[in-house]
Amino acid sequence: MKPRIGITPSTSTDDLGHGTFYRFNLSDTYVRAVIAAGGTPVIIPPLIEDVEDALRGLDGLVLSGGGDIEPSLFNDPEQHPKTYGIDANRDRFEIAAWDFAAQHDLPVLCICRGIQVMNVAAGGTLWQDIEDQVPGSIPHRQSEIGRKQDETCHTVTLEPGDNPFRKILGSDSVETNSYHHQAIRDVAPGLMLGASTSDGVVEAIWNPQMRFGLGVQWHPEMLQQKFDDHAKLFRALIDAASRVPAATS
Protein backbone atom coordinates (compact mmCIF):
# COMPACT_ATOMS: atom_id res chain seq x y z
CA MET A 1 0.00 0.00 0.00
CA LYS A 2 1.09 3.54 -0.66
CA PRO A 3 1.85 5.62 2.47
CA ARG A 4 -1.19 7.52 3.72
CA ILE A 5 -0.28 11.18 4.24
CA GLY A 6 -2.60 13.41 6.26
CA ILE A 7 -2.88 17.03 5.11
CA THR A 8 -4.44 19.78 7.21
CA PRO A 9 -6.69 22.25 5.35
CA SER A 10 -7.28 25.96 5.80
CA THR A 11 -10.67 27.13 7.06
CA SER A 12 -13.11 29.88 6.18
CA THR A 13 -16.55 31.08 7.23
CA ASP A 14 -18.76 31.91 4.28
CA ASP A 15 -22.04 33.83 4.59
CA LEU A 16 -24.37 32.76 1.78
CA GLY A 17 -28.00 33.44 1.04
CA HIS A 18 -29.08 30.11 2.49
CA GLY A 19 -26.86 30.13 5.58
CA THR A 20 -23.41 30.50 7.14
CA PHE A 21 -20.92 27.72 6.52
CA TYR A 22 -17.60 26.85 8.18
CA ARG A 23 -15.57 25.37 5.34
CA PHE A 24 -12.34 23.43 4.87
CA ASN A 25 -10.17 24.55 1.95
CA LEU A 26 -7.05 22.99 0.46
CA SER A 27 -5.18 23.84 -2.72
CA ASP A 28 -4.82 20.90 -5.09
CA THR A 29 -1.07 21.60 -5.21
CA TYR A 30 -0.61 19.82 -1.85
CA VAL A 31 -2.62 16.82 -3.01
CA ARG A 32 -0.83 16.62 -6.35
CA ALA A 33 2.59 16.87 -4.69
CA VAL A 34 1.84 13.96 -2.35
CA ILE A 35 0.44 11.85 -5.20
CA ALA A 36 3.42 12.64 -7.45
CA ALA A 37 5.81 11.56 -4.68
CA GLY A 38 4.03 8.22 -4.29
CA GLY A 39 1.68 8.81 -1.36
CA THR A 40 -2.08 8.75 -0.82
CA PRO A 41 -3.37 12.10 0.50
CA VAL A 42 -5.93 12.16 3.33
CA ILE A 43 -7.44 15.53 4.29
CA ILE A 44 -7.73 15.92 8.08
CA PRO A 45 -10.31 18.53 9.25
CA PRO A 46 -9.46 20.42 12.47
CA LEU A 47 -12.78 19.75 14.18
CA ILE A 48 -11.84 16.27 15.38
CA GLU A 49 -11.34 16.58 19.15
CA ASP A 50 -9.20 13.45 19.55
CA VAL A 51 -6.03 14.13 17.57
CA GLU A 52 -4.74 10.60 18.10
CA ASP A 53 -7.96 9.28 16.60
CA ALA A 54 -7.61 11.68 13.66
CA LEU A 55 -4.05 10.59 12.92
CA ARG A 56 -4.49 6.89 13.64
CA GLY A 57 -3.26 4.77 10.75
CA LEU A 58 -1.46 7.59 8.95
CA ASP A 59 2.12 7.10 7.77
CA GLY A 60 2.98 10.79 7.48
CA LEU A 61 1.62 14.31 7.88
CA VAL A 62 1.71 17.67 6.09
CA LEU A 63 0.85 20.82 8.05
CA SER A 64 -0.19 23.21 5.29
CA GLY A 65 -0.12 26.99 4.82
CA GLY A 66 -2.86 29.44 5.73
CA GLY A 67 -3.79 32.21 8.16
CA ASP A 68 -1.88 33.42 11.20
CA ILE A 69 -1.58 31.88 14.66
CA GLU A 70 -3.13 33.45 17.77
CA PRO A 71 -0.28 35.62 19.20
CA SER A 72 -0.95 34.64 22.82
CA LEU A 73 0.12 31.09 21.91
CA PHE A 74 3.69 32.35 21.51
CA ASN A 75 3.49 34.77 24.46
CA ASP A 76 2.99 37.93 22.41
CA PRO A 77 0.55 40.14 24.37
CA GLU A 78 -0.56 42.26 21.39
CA GLN A 79 -1.97 41.41 17.99
CA HIS A 80 -0.28 43.24 15.11
CA PRO A 81 -2.69 45.11 12.78
CA LYS A 82 -1.57 42.90 9.86
CA THR A 83 -2.17 39.63 11.68
CA TYR A 84 -5.13 37.90 10.05
CA GLY A 85 -7.08 34.67 9.62
CA ILE A 86 -6.81 33.39 13.20
CA ASP A 87 -8.82 30.20 13.78
CA ALA A 88 -8.81 28.72 17.28
CA ASN A 89 -9.93 25.31 16.02
CA ARG A 90 -7.06 25.09 13.60
CA ASP A 91 -4.48 26.39 16.09
CA ARG A 92 -5.55 23.84 18.69
CA PHE A 93 -5.67 20.92 16.29
CA GLU A 94 -2.40 21.57 14.47
CA ILE A 95 -0.39 22.24 17.62
CA ALA A 96 -1.70 18.98 19.04
CA ALA A 97 -0.97 17.23 15.73
CA TRP A 98 2.65 18.43 15.79
CA ASP A 99 3.00 17.30 19.40
CA PHE A 100 1.62 13.88 18.48
CA ALA A 101 3.94 13.58 15.48
CA ALA A 102 6.99 14.51 17.56
CA GLN A 103 6.07 12.09 20.35
CA HIS A 104 5.34 9.19 17.98
CA ASP A 105 8.05 9.91 15.39
CA LEU A 106 5.43 10.31 12.67
CA PRO A 107 7.14 11.82 9.59
CA VAL A 108 5.91 15.36 9.08
CA LEU A 109 6.57 18.16 6.58
CA CYS A 110 5.44 21.58 7.80
CA ILE A 111 4.87 24.23 5.12
CA CYS A 112 4.59 28.04 5.54
CA ARG A 113 2.06 28.41 8.39
CA GLY A 114 3.03 24.83 9.21
CA ILE A 115 6.64 25.69 10.11
CA GLN A 116 5.28 28.42 12.38
CA VAL A 117 2.92 25.94 14.08
CA MET A 118 5.86 23.56 14.52
CA ASN A 119 7.95 26.29 16.16
CA VAL A 120 5.16 27.64 18.39
CA ALA A 121 4.16 24.13 19.50
CA ALA A 122 7.75 23.50 20.61
CA GLY A 123 7.98 26.80 22.54
CA GLY A 124 9.36 29.21 19.93
CA THR A 125 8.18 32.69 18.93
CA LEU A 126 7.20 34.51 15.73
CA TRP A 127 7.56 37.88 14.06
CA GLN A 128 3.98 39.02 13.44
CA ASP A 129 4.95 41.12 10.43
CA ILE A 130 8.36 40.92 8.77
CA GLU A 131 8.14 44.24 6.95
CA ASP A 132 7.40 46.13 10.17
CA GLN A 133 9.51 44.14 12.60
CA VAL A 134 12.63 42.93 10.73
CA PRO A 135 14.86 45.87 9.71
CA GLY A 136 16.35 45.52 6.25
CA SER A 137 14.10 42.64 5.26
CA ILE A 138 13.75 41.62 1.62
CA PRO A 139 10.29 41.05 0.05
CA HIS A 140 8.69 37.85 1.33
CA ARG A 141 5.38 38.10 -0.53
CA GLN A 142 6.34 37.54 -4.13
CA SER A 143 2.90 38.41 -5.47
CA GLU A 144 3.72 41.98 -4.51
CA ILE A 145 6.71 41.97 -6.88
CA GLY A 146 4.88 40.29 -9.75
CA ARG A 147 6.09 36.69 -9.35
CA LYS A 148 3.71 33.78 -9.99
CA GLN A 149 3.21 30.77 -7.72
CA ASP A 150 5.48 28.45 -9.75
CA GLU A 151 8.30 31.00 -9.95
CA THR A 152 11.10 31.54 -7.45
CA CYS A 153 11.99 34.91 -5.95
CA HIS A 154 14.95 34.51 -3.61
CA THR A 155 17.79 32.28 -2.47
CA VAL A 156 17.61 30.28 0.74
CA THR A 157 20.99 29.33 2.23
CA LEU A 158 21.19 26.01 4.06
CA GLU A 159 23.01 25.77 7.38
CA PRO A 160 26.28 23.77 7.30
CA GLY A 161 26.90 20.53 9.13
CA ASP A 162 24.61 17.57 9.73
CA ASN A 163 21.62 19.27 8.11
CA PRO A 164 18.89 17.03 6.61
CA PHE A 165 18.01 19.72 4.05
CA ARG A 166 21.54 19.48 2.63
CA LYS A 167 21.21 15.70 2.41
CA ILE A 168 17.81 15.86 0.70
CA LEU A 169 18.60 18.71 -1.71
CA GLY A 170 22.24 17.85 -2.30
CA SER A 171 23.33 21.49 -2.23
CA ASP A 172 24.09 24.39 0.10
CA SER A 173 21.31 26.67 -1.22
CA VAL A 174 17.98 26.53 -3.01
CA GLU A 175 15.86 29.01 -4.98
CA THR A 176 12.39 29.29 -3.46
CA ASN A 177 9.08 31.08 -3.75
CA SER A 178 7.73 33.15 -0.87
CA TYR A 179 4.18 33.91 0.32
CA HIS A 180 4.39 34.91 3.98
CA HIS A 181 4.38 38.03 6.14
CA GLN A 182 5.16 36.28 9.43
CA ALA A 183 8.20 34.18 10.29
CA ILE A 184 10.05 32.46 13.10
CA ARG A 185 11.66 34.89 15.53
CA ASP A 186 13.24 32.58 18.14
CA VAL A 187 13.74 28.95 17.12
CA ALA A 188 12.18 26.72 19.75
CA PRO A 189 14.36 24.78 22.19
CA GLY A 190 15.10 21.35 20.77
CA LEU A 191 14.64 22.43 17.16
CA MET A 192 17.49 23.28 14.80
CA LEU A 193 17.91 26.06 12.25
CA GLY A 194 18.00 24.57 8.76
CA ALA A 195 18.08 27.58 6.43
CA SER A 196 17.59 31.34 6.15
CA THR A 197 17.48 34.16 3.61
CA SER A 198 20.00 36.99 3.23
CA ASP A 199 18.03 39.19 5.65
CA GLY A 200 18.29 36.57 8.41
CA VAL A 201 14.67 35.41 8.21
CA VAL A 202 14.37 31.73 9.17
CA GLU A 203 13.31 29.60 6.20
CA ALA A 204 13.70 26.04 7.52
CA ILE A 205 13.96 24.19 10.83
CA TRP A 206 14.12 20.54 11.84
CA ASN A 207 13.74 18.27 14.84
CA PRO A 208 16.91 16.19 15.41
CA GLN A 209 14.99 13.73 17.62
CA MET A 210 12.75 12.66 14.72
CA ARG A 211 13.59 10.58 11.70
CA PHE A 212 11.74 13.15 9.59
CA GLY A 213 10.46 16.30 11.25
CA LEU A 214 11.07 19.19 8.84
CA GLY A 215 9.56 22.64 8.33
CA VAL A 216 9.98 25.07 5.43
CA GLN A 217 8.71 28.62 5.17
CA TRP A 218 8.30 28.48 1.38
CA HIS A 219 5.75 26.51 -0.69
CA PRO A 220 7.46 23.49 -2.32
CA GLU A 221 4.09 22.06 -3.37
CA MET A 222 3.71 24.96 -5.83
CA LEU A 223 7.17 24.38 -7.30
CA GLN A 224 7.60 20.60 -7.33
CA GLN A 225 6.30 20.05 -10.87
CA LYS A 226 8.75 22.57 -12.34
CA PHE A 227 11.75 22.30 -9.99
CA ASP A 228 12.99 18.91 -8.82
CA ASP A 229 14.65 20.35 -5.69
CA HIS A 230 11.17 20.89 -4.26
CA ALA A 231 9.84 17.52 -5.38
CA LYS A 232 12.75 16.00 -3.42
CA LEU A 233 11.19 17.21 -0.16
CA PHE A 234 7.97 15.30 -0.86
CA ARG A 235 9.83 12.20 -2.04
CA ALA A 236 11.87 12.29 1.17
CA LEU A 237 8.65 12.53 3.21
CA ILE A 238 7.15 9.55 1.36
CA ASP A 239 10.38 7.58 1.78
CA ALA A 240 10.36 8.22 5.53
CA ALA A 241 6.65 7.38 5.73
CA SER A 242 7.28 4.11 3.87
CA ARG A 243 9.89 3.04 6.40
CA VAL A 244 8.12 4.07 9.60
CA PRO A 245 5.10 2.08 10.85
CA ALA A 246 1.79 3.94 11.03
CA ALA A 247 1.61 6.15 14.13
CA THR A 248 -1.15 4.16 15.78
CA SER A 249 -2.29 1.08 13.95
Image (cartoon, rainbow, N blue to C red):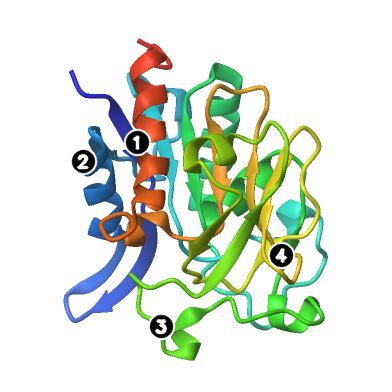
Q: Name the N-terminal-most of marks 4 and 1.
A: 4
Q: Name the N-terminal-most of marks 3 and 1.
A: 3
As measured in the structure, the alpha-carbon distance from the residue carrying label 3 to the one carrying label 1 is: 26 Å
Helix, strand or loop for disc 1: helix
Residue at 58% x, 76% y is 140
Q: According to the image, label 3 marks what residue?
A: 147
Q: According to the image, label 1 marks what residue?
A: 235
Instruction: Please identify the quadrant where the N terminus is shown.
Output: top left
Helix, strand or loop for disc 4: loop
Instruction: Evaluate whether residue 71 shows in this view.
Output: yes
Residue at 35% x, 61% y is 223
Side of 41 where 196 appears, left or right: right
Instruction: Please identify the quadrant where the C terminus is shown.
Output: top left
Instruction: Evaluate whether residue 96 shows in this view.
Output: no
Side of 136 where 152 appears, left or right: left
Q: Name the N-terminal-most of marks 3 and 2.
A: 2
Side of 1 where 145 appears, left or right: right
Which x, y percent locates residue 14?
30, 73
The answer to which image quadrant residue 138 occupies is bottom right
Residue closer to the observer: 245 or 228? 228
Q: Nearer the viewer, mark 1 or mark 2?
A: 1
Q: Name the N-terminal-most of marks 3 and 4.
A: 3
Residue at 34% x, 51% y is 228
Reply above or below: 68 against 123: below
Q: How many marks?
A: 4
Determine crowd level at label 3: few under 14, some 14-19, many 20+ residues with C-alpha closer than 10 A: some
